[in-house]
């Protein structure tokens, strides 16, 4: 009886793991490079929401002079910290220059950052992609 219960528990646990790994939540949480153009772009603007290391990738919002609000994605938190950036370090109102690859969808104002300049300092978030 105990062996049957253990097998059933392992089976149910395996099914739950497969469901979780295949869920849209899991796949949408990762921001690979496939959705971004190959050429590098540069934007500059004012930070609207401070640097956050929450989530699968560090991020901040930047408003450019033309009024567009950009979602700026950096490396995962550990990689962003290795580049020298910390949670909340770049405050709202700061001016930044973002170098990276923008979304393939021209209507989506999102850029995956390779390098960010703030306060006269350059942070190489993905140094191998420059």
Image: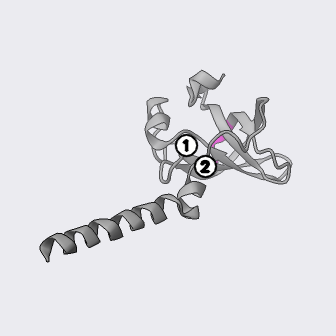
Region rendered in magenta:
90-96
**Foreground of the two, 89 or 78:** 78
**Foreground of the two, 112 or 69:** 112
Give percent across and percent down for residue 75.
Answer: 54, 39
CB-based contact (under 8 Å), mark 1 and mark 2: yes
Q: Residue at x 57, y 55 (%)?
A: 27
Which of the image's four quarters has the C terminus?
top right
Q: Residue at x 78, y 37 (%)?
A: 37
Image mark for residue 60: 2
Asked if the stretch drawn in magenta spans residue 16, the answer is no
Magenta stretch, overall SS: loop
Task: Report the colour scheme.
Answer: one colour
List the residue tagged with mark 1.
Answer: 90
Q: Residue at x 70, y 41 (%)?
A: 34
Q: Residues within 10 Å of mark 2 (few under 14, many from 20)?
A: many
Give percent across and percent down for residue 104.
Answer: 80, 44
Q: Residue at x 13, y 74 (%)?
A: 2
Which of the image's four quarters has the N terminus?
bottom left
């Amino acid at each position: 009886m105990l062996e049957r219960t253990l097998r059933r528990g392992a089976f149910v646990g395996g099914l739950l793991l497969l469901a979780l790994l295949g869920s849209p939540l899991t796949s949408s949480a990762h921001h690979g490079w496939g959705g971004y153009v190959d050429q590098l772009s540069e934007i500059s603007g004012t930070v609207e929401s401070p640097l956050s290391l929450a989530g699968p990738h560090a991020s901040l919002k930047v408003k450019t002079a033309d009024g567009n609000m950009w979602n700026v994605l950096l490396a995962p938190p550990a990689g962003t910290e290795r580049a020298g950036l910390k949670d909340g370090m770049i405050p709202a109102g700061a001016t930044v220059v973002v170098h990276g690859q923008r979304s393939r969808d021209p209507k989506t104002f999102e850029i995956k950052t390779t390098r960010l300049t703030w306060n006269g300092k350059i942070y190489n978030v993905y140094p191998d992609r420059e």
